[in-house]
Amino acid sequence: MRHLSAEVIDRATREGRAALVAYIPVGFPSFEGSVEAVRALVGSGVDAIEFGIPYTDPVMDGPVIQEAADLALAQGTRPVDVMRAIDSLNDLDAALLVMSYYNPILKYGLEAFARDLAAAGGAGVITPDLTPDSGGEWIAASRTRGVERIFLAAPSSPEKRLRLVTKSSTGFVYAASTMGVTGLRSSVGEAARTLVERTRDAGAERVCVGLGVSNGAQAAEVGAYADGVIVGSAFVRRLLEAQTPSEGLRSIEALAREFRTGIEEARA
């Protein structure tokens, strides 16, 4: 069954909390391992998954996600694998998204990517390096197939840019909490709250915050004002550090529960 991100975020809002969104690269630590990781995360309270497509030139990825992506690529992971993964997981009560740089989507074929993602049960696509004013062809292809388009807003985005991002996005707007690459941070900072407020003022219905959330306390901080809390490097690092696959699964399950607890307490 296909669940859109708008659906699961709105459901979380009705429950009085932010949605919890987790990032996992497809093919890491193996294809089967990435599928098992998603099942473990959803079973531990995650509302939506961002399946990352490993890419050879990850300009926005920090060292943790780069290492995971390199391992996935070394095992032969390709963009088509994200379709196989989502198809095998579409029984889950969660939104299954793809996060990808634009070039792999372009090489796959815009129409074909939107078609195959929708057929597999995928909700939408986050394109961190594609701006709405350069994405007319992708906007058209995704609209035809009912695929959500999620563009990024940054603290440096002027009001005109935020209005364009909001107008062009469906599902939610991805608010990058800080400038720079992905990774763990000791503090998310006030810039994220300000960006969420500015993006809502620009017309966004749903704003999720990513880049830097690494523990339950930070999840609670962000969950108090954002519609969704996005966590990537913290989960990926747990899988990288695990001595065995089963240890990795137990570790990310525990971390997901920590994040979910923080989020639920944020608005109590």
Image (tube, grey):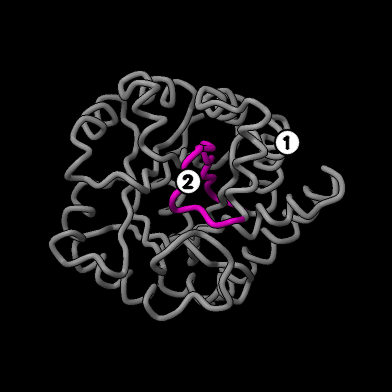
SS class of the residue under badge 1?
helix
Q: Is residue 193 above or below residue 106?
A: below
Location of residue 102 by image quarter: top left
Image location of residue 63, percent across then percent down: 59, 56
On the image, numbered disc 1 is attached to which residue? 33
On the image, numbered disc 2 is attached to which residue? 58
Q: Residue furthest left?
A: 160
Q: Is residue 189 visible?
A: yes
Closer to the camera in the image, 258 or 135: 135
Disc 2 marks which amino acid? Pro
Say whether disc 1 or disc 2 marks the residue closer to the N-terminus.
Answer: 1
Q: Is residue 56 magenta?
A: yes
Closer to the camera in the image, 101 or 15: 101
Q: Is residue 54 above or below residue 179?
A: above
The quadrant of the image that shows the C terminus is bottom right
- Say left or right for 70 vs 158: right
Q: Residue at x 61, y 71 (%)?
A: 262
Could you tell me what secondary structure mostly forms the magenta stretch?
A: loop
Image location of residue 109, percent across then percent down: 34, 21
Instruction: Report, in whole angstroms, how far the alpha carbon at label 1 lies from the one at label 2.
Output: 22 Å
Disc 1 marks which amino acid? Gly
SS class of the residue under badge 2?
loop
Q: Is residue 61 magenta?
A: yes
Q: Residue at x 43, y 20 (%)?
A: 116
The residue range painted magenta reads 46-63
Closer to the camera in the image, 45 or 129: 129
In this rendering, which labeled residue sits more in front, label 1 or label 2? 2
Q: Is residue 267 visible?
A: no
- Say left or right for 96 vs 145: right
Q: Residue at x 50, y 37 (%)?
A: 55
Image location of residue 133, percent across then percent down: 17, 45
Q: Residue at x 46, y 75 (%)?
A: 224
